[in-house]
Image (spheres, rainbow, N blue to C red):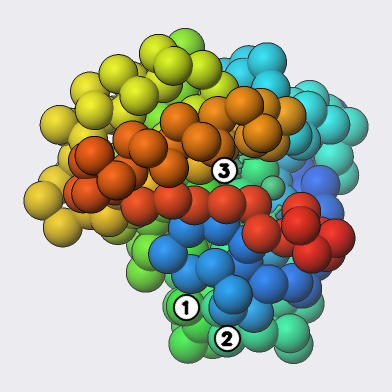
């Protein structure tokens, strides 16, 4: 990467943009709501079941000026979801400041494994065992969304629930490839422990992005 571009990426004034799309938020608290998704490239958390492994290598995604991303996003929706990859690998301050200047609602999907930057109307924290969230994101998360791949994830979910703030809404979401096996166990678990709710990847059932 050219030195001047690298400097702008380091400041969050340019971001490796993988894709952008207008769709329906499929998961968690805001499921069913139309939103414009900005998918930022780059992630080193390494979830073996990740459904967007193409996002991991930041170098294959073109560094894009944040004003250009914002200008485009604002044409589509009042609600913007920033996801990745892991968006918090980058300084989210310029992007979120500019989205706020347009009066948009800004949500983030994050593992919380990197320092929390940017200003957010909604934080969806989906913690990962390999690289745990920072204390700040546990304190500020609006929803906790734990992916259930196997039985140990129920233990992990409780451990993570003990760390988030009291207002945080708790979700268990089946890992997509294990949904048939884990869904009955999730149903049973939620009925026994009703502080949890079920989150499904509804966009995958609807065949939308
Ligand atoms: C692709 S990640 C990107 C944002 C961030 N890196 C994170 O993990 O939160 C977006 C959401 O999809 C979830 N996810 C990824 N792969 C999944 C899968 N195979 N089944 C269910 N959820 C998955 C993640 O846990 C996260 O909540
Ligand atoms: N429709 C839809 N909803 C989503 N919610 C979180 C997603 C993500 O990949 O971050 C996602 C996604 O990729 N598509
Ligand atoms: S943290 Fe998110 S983007 Fe990174 S590997 Fe895990 S699910 Fe995929
Ligand atoms: Mg997704």
Name the side, left or right, on which 85 lies relative to 117.
Answer: right
Say what secondary structure mark 2 lies in. Answer: loop
Is 69 above or below relative to 199?
A: below
Query: Residue 73: which disc?
Result: none
Left or right: 29 in relation to 58: left
Q: Report the residue at 56% width, 57% height from top.
A: 27
**Camera-side residue: 104 or 153?**
153
Q: Is residue 193 above or below residue 158?
A: below
Q: Is residue 183 found left or right of 159 in the rendered image?
A: right
Q: Which residue is mark 1?
A: 105
Numbered tag placed on residue 87 in the rendering: 3
Q: CA distance from mark 1 to mark 2?
A: 6 Å
Where residue 109 sits: x, y (%)?
Answer: 52, 49
Establish whether ligand 1 lies closer than 8 Å to the Cβ of label 3.
yes
- Say whether mark 2 is within 8 Å of ligand 2: no
x and y percent of residue 18 in the render? 81, 47
Q: Secondary structure at mark 3?
A: helix
Assess whether mark 2 and mark 1 are in contact (beta carbons under 8 angstroms). yes
- Mark 1 surroundings within 10 Å by alpha-carbon count, few (fewer than 14), some (14 through 19), many (20 or more): some
146 to 21, vertically: above or below: above
């Amino acid at each position: 990467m050219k030195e001047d571009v690298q400097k702008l990426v380091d400041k969050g004034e340019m971001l490796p943009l993988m894709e952008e799309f207008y769709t329906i938020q499929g998961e968690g608290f805001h499921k069913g709501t139309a939103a414009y998704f900005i998918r930022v490239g780059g992630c080193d958390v390494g979830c073996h079941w990740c459904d967007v492994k193409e996002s991991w290598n930041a170098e294959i995604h073109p560094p894009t000026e944040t004003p250009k991303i914002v200008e485009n996003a604002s044409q589509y929706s009042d609600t913007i979801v920033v996801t990745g990859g892991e968006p918090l690998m980058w300084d989210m301050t310029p992007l979120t400041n500019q989205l706020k200047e347009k009066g948009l609602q800004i949500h983030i999907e994050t593992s919380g494994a990197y320092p929390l930057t940017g200003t957010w109307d909604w934080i969806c924290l989906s913690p990962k065992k390999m690289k745990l969230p920072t204390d700040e994101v546990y304190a500020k998360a609006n929803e906790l969304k734990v992916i259930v791949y196997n039985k140990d994830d129920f233990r992990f979910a409780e451990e993570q629930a003990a760390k988030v703030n009291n207002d945080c809404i708790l979700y268990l979401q089946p890992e997509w490839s294990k949904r048939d096996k884990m869904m009955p166990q999730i149903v049973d678990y939620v009925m026994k422990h009703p502080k949890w709710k079920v989150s499904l990847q509804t966009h995958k059932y609807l065949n939308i992005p």
